């Protein structure tokens, strides 16, 4: 085993391991604050559900939209500069977000309304976040060989989920013992350490240094070419419905758990179930579904994940929510790897990398819509079911409509994906017949 591990490390360039370590700690920082954000905004800073959801939408939407543009700059100016810029911005951003409501920013809060102050800080932090994934994925692409590239991406995917699983555990520990704002300080500290780690350990792959990069104008023109591919854009829009459901894990579930089950419930640990399930079950699910065509896997993944909300509706307790998130993870594991494969297979020849750059667009669209939508849905369906008096909350009923609406979104997404596949398959058959 020791010999095999040594051989594994030798098979990959040093930059590969450094970049993946940076990704691990970036995910840890991101998910630590993400799992508490809606509660931080609503309960700590006293925003309404709608405003809390809107701020979540702003942050999440920009985090996943901006990589399309950030990747262009990372390619142009080098991954080392991109990593350094990203972690420095994130360190400052997370620190300032956690400082909102403290004397440190009291003067600024008197000048700028609190909502817009948070919006500015969240967008600023999202700009830093957006440089990470293009730089990590670019490093993997340039520091692996055709023989170990597949394994390299598997290691990357595993570490992303390790960060997604450990981050909420750290968030729960610090929220319980110090306070919810301390979670943002932990995220800032993690980013600060990674800024130093980039300067000391990261070395730009020689393959990037040797590249003759086209001008920014050419890169932006190439990006615009994707937007006029109607078939591909429809596919991405359908996929955004799936991610609208997913983000309710970070919007509706923490509010529901703290309001309807227990205000002291470890909602961070509940939200981490998806990541832990992927770590444990990914290989098994891949083995079971590997012979399915990519689009069939996507449809099956949509259908399985949709069952999540029905499981919760049956008996909404903590353990049923945990079981439901395991169901969600099985659907996610079924479709996620095949999603990227499908994009690669259907991208025009010579534009594979360009089309993969848009893979995060559905996640961005979903966050821009999902945070506000989820908070509105929660506020609407729980109205009259909660009575708050003297700090105590009385539960008068269950908001079953929440889970039924989310189920309906999943059903619509599944039907649209089936219809899309039928249309595309017909067009492909017609093209082959000509």
Image (cartoon, rainbow, N blue to C red):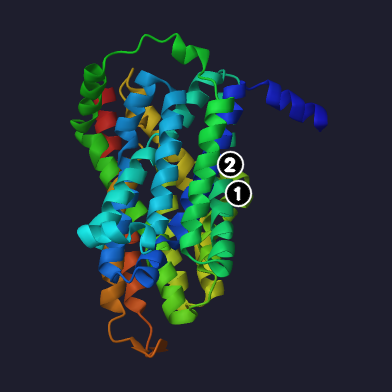
Quadrant placement of the N terminus: top right
Quadrant placement of the C terminus: top left
Decide: few, some or many residues near mark 2? Use Cα within 10 Å; few <14, some 14-19, many ≥20.
some
| 374, above or below 420, in the image | below
Q: Position of residue 216 (x, y in %)?
A: 26, 19
Residue at 61% x, 20% y is 13
| 351, above or below 275, in the image | above
Q: Of the residues under marks 1 and 2, which one precedes in the sequence?
A: 2
Query: In which image quadrant can residue 20 be found?
Result: top right
**Contact (Cβ within 8 Å) of mark 1 with mark 2:** yes
Label of residue 279 in the image: 1
Confirm whether residue 394 shows in the render.
yes
Query: In which image quadrant can residue 124 be found?
Result: top left
Label of residue 158 in the image: 2
Q: Residue furthest right?
A: 2
**Alpha-carbon span between mark 1 and mark 2:** 7 Å
Residue at 33% x, 29% y is 355
Secondary structure of residue under mark 2: helix
Decide: few, some or many residues near mark 1? Use Cα within 10 Å; few <14, some 14-19, many ≥20.
some
Secondary structure of residue under mark 1: helix
Q: Position of residue 176 (x, y in %)?
A: 56, 69
- Report whether 97 appears left or right of 372: right
């Amino acid at each position: 085993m020791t010999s095999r591990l040594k051989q594994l490390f030798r098979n990959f360039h040093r930059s590969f391991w450094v970049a993946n370590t940076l990704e691990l700690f970036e995910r840890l920082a991101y998910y630590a604050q993400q799992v508490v954000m809606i509660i931080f905004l609503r309960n700590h800073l006293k925003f309404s559900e709608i405003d809390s959801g809107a701020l979540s939408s702003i942050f999440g939407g920009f985090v996943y939209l901006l990589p399309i543009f950030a990747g262009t700059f990372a390619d142009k100016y080098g991954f080392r500069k991109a990593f350094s810029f990203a972690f420095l911005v994130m360190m400052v951003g997370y620190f300032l977000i956690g400082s909102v409501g403290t004397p440190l920013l009291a003067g600024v809060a008197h000048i700028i309304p609190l909502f817009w102050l948070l919006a500015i800080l969240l967008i600023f932090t999202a700009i830093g976040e957006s440089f990470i994934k293009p730089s990590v994925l670019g490093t993997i692409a340039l520091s692996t060989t055709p023989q170990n590239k597949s394994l390299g991406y598997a290691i990357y995917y595993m570490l992303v989920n390790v960060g997604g699983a450990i981050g909420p555990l750290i968030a729960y520990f610090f929220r319980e013992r110090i306070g919810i704002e301390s979670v943002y300080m932990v995220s800032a500290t993690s980013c600060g350490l990674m800024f130093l780690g980039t300067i000391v350990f990261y070395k730009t792959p020689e393959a990037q240094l040797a590249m003759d990069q086209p001008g920014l104008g050419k890169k932006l023109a190439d990006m615009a070419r994707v937007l006029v591919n109607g078939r591909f854009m429809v596919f991405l829009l359908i996929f955004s419905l799936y991610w609208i459901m997913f983000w309710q894990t970070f919007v509706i579930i923490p509010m529901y758990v703290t309001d309807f089950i227990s205000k002291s419930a470890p909602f961070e640990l509940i939200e981490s179930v998806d990541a832990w399930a992927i770590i444990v079950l990914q290989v098994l699910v891949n083995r079971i579904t590997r012979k399915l065509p990519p689009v069939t896997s996507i449809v099956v993944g949509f259908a399985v994940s949709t069952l999540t909300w029905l499981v919760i509706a049956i008996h909404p307790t903590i353990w049923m929510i945990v079981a439901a998130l395991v169901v969600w993870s099985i659907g996610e594991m079924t479709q996620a790897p095949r999603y990227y494969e499908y994009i690669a297979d259907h991208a025009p020849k010579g534009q594979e990398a360009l089309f993969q750059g848009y893979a995060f667009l559905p996640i961005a669209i979903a966050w821009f819509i999902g945070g506000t939508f989820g908070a509105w849905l929660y506020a609407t369906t729980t109205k009259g079911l909660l009575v708050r008096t003297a700090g105590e909350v009385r539960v008068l009923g269950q908001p079953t409509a929440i889970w039924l609406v989310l189920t309906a979104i999943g059903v619509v997404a599944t039907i649209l994906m089936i219809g899309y596949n039928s249309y595309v398959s017909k067009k492909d058959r017609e093209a082959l017949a000509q």
